[in-house]
Amino acid sequence: MGNLKLTAYENFASGQPSSPLSGGTYTLQLNPENLSISYDQLPAKSDEPASAAGMPVSEKNAAYNKQTVKVEFSIDNSGAIPTKPEKVTSSAGGSIKASVDHFLKVAVKPTKATHRPPFVQLQWGQFILVGKVFGLSISYTYFDVDGEPIRADIGFSLVEEVDETVISREFQSPDITRIVTVKDGDTLIGLCESFYEDPKYYLQVAIYNNLPSFRGLKIGSQIEFPPLEK
């Protein structure tokens, strides 16, 4: 699997991070023993809870459960571990301050371009999550004779970053009803391809919505895409 890696980005849009921070990667010296993942439901945009059936696109986020990952790991330059921490060049027993500072740059320090903390991508094997770091704690547990830290335990939570693109991916399913507002350029065939991954259902959708024709959809009108029969 390799070691867990954090990568910092300046921006996040359309479900993807962009503009990687220069020198903004941090690879853990030791992998954590486990990852703790929790799921929190995003709040609804309206006072009425969205239902699984007949859910307007604007309220999809009422049912999206974003992830929070809790990570705990150690940085150790005591000599007990054969590999050195990231950015540490001194021999065993030397300070880990450079490693901690670099981790903070990747995880939480505002970037010069945006003046806000970076978006962080966590990757460990096939597991990838992009979000913002919260609840960061550092506990220094071992020091040299001059009081320089040699070992530290670090914990943080990474809260998933989501936008309409991320949410939409969760709802590309034929098992729920969607109601969409027609935009310029939309076609019934194209919308069926998007929702059902198959354009052949355009006639059934036209009949279901009592459309006089599947061509020339009226901009601003709403079309309901019902669940598919199994």
Image (tube, grey):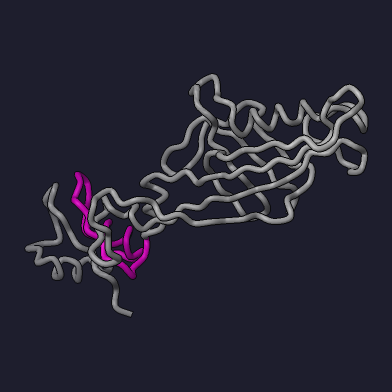
Q: In the displayed structure, does residue 37 sit left or right of residue 23?
A: left
Q: What number of labels is visible?
A: 0
Q: In the displayed structure, does residue 86 sit left or right of residue 77?
A: left
Residue 32 percent coordinates (x, y): 73, 51
The residue drawn where x is 79% and y is 42% is 29
Q: In the displayed structure, does residue 189 sit left or right of residue 128?
A: left
The quadrant where residue 191 appears: bottom left
The residue drawn where x is 29% and y is 64% is 199
Looking at this view, is 85 or 212 the one in front? 85
Residue 184 percent coordinates (x, y): 19, 44
- State which region is magenta: 172-199
Up-down relation of residue 141 to residue 88 (above or below):
below
Residue 130 percent coordinates (x, y): 54, 44
Residue furthest out toward the top? 112
The quadrant where residue 25 appears: top right
Looking at this view, is 170 or 215 the one in front? 170
Which quadrant is home to the N terminus? bottom right
Residue 37 percent coordinates (x, y): 57, 56
Residue furthest out toward the bottom? 230
* Residue 192 among magenta residues: yes
The residue drawn where x is 77% and y is 37% is 152
Which quadrant is home to the C terminus? bottom left
Up-down relation of residue 122 to residue 25 (above or below):
below
The residue drawn where x is 53% and y is 39% is 132
* Residue 176 among magenta residues: yes
Up-down relation of residue 189 to residue 219 (above or below):
below
